Image: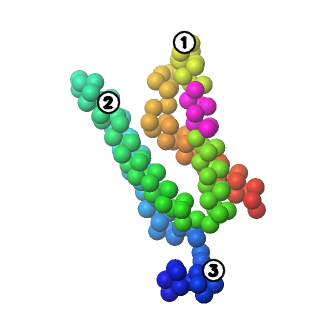
């Protein structure tokens, strides 16, 4: 039975993404992380590369990151209203939290309070990691709130 037939007959539709779809979504995060680790290694061990090559290599994780975002948006469109609201609240919490943490680190660095761990801010890997951590917290908080 196809989707339109189910709607006409009044059968309920499960709007949750399947386990396979969720796996395909999360695999892009794993690819992004692996790409970041490889580019970090390359840039640190090949300092003789020109700045243009170093910047190009450093930005490579953005490509699988965009695929991760696109897959996430497709999954979001498949969710029911409550799941969509939980995810949007979690992503908003993660985005604003990441902006605030990045701003604080940059202000400290601008005023000479450079943290050895973050001399150039969060960079790409730290940004993805922080957003994932905050998104996880946001999903937990939102899910608990709607129970």
Alpha carbon distance from label 3 to label 2: 50 Å
Horizontal and vertical percent for residue 87? 61, 55
Disc assigned to residue 137: none
N-terminal label among 3 and 1 = 3
Disc assigned to residue 12: 3
Check residue 102 for magenta coloring. Answer: yes
Query: Would you say residue 34 is visible in this rendering?
Result: no
Horizontal and vertical percent for residue 95? 58, 41
N-terminal label among 3 and 2 = 3
For this orientation, the residue located farthest to the front is 8
Residue placed most toward the observer, 35 or 44: 35
Residue at 42% x, 47% y is 65
CB under 8 Å between callouts 2 and 1? no
Assess disc 2: are there few (<14), some (14-19) or many (≥20) residues with their C-alpha within 10 Å of its C-alpha.
few
Alpha carbon distance from label 2 to label 1: 25 Å
Disc assigned to residue 55: 2
The residue pinned by badge 1 equals 112
Check residue 97 for magenta coloring. Answer: yes
Residue at 65% x, 57% y is 85
Residue at 60% x, 25% y is 104
Question: Looking at the figure, which quarter contains the C terminus?
Answer: bottom right
Residue placed most toward the observer, 41 or 70: 70
Horizontal and vertical percent for residue 57? 30, 35
N-terminal label among 2 and 1 = 2
Nearer the camera: disc 3 or disc 1: 3
Q: Which stretch is magenta?
A: 96-103
**Quadrant of the image occupied by residue 111:** top right
């Amino acid at each position: 039975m196809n989707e339109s037939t189910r709607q006409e007959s009044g059968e309920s539709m499960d709007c949750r993404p399947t386990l396979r779809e969720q796996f395909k979504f999360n695999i892009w995060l794993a690819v992004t992380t692996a790409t970041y680790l490889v580019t970090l290694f390359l840039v640190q061990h090949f300092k003789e590369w020109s700045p243009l090559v170093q910047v190009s290599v450093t930005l490579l994780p953005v490509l699988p990151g965009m695929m991760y975002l696109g897959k996430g948006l497709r999954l979001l469109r498949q969710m029911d209203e409550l799941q969509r609201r939980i995810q949007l609240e979690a992503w908003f919490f993660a985005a604003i939290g990441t902006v605030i943490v990045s701003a604080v680190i940059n202000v400290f660095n601008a005023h000479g309070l450079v943290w050895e761990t973050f001399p150039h801010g969060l960079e790409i890997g730290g940004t993805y990691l922080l957003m994932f951590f905050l998104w996880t917290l946001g999903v937990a908080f939102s899910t608990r709130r709607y129970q």
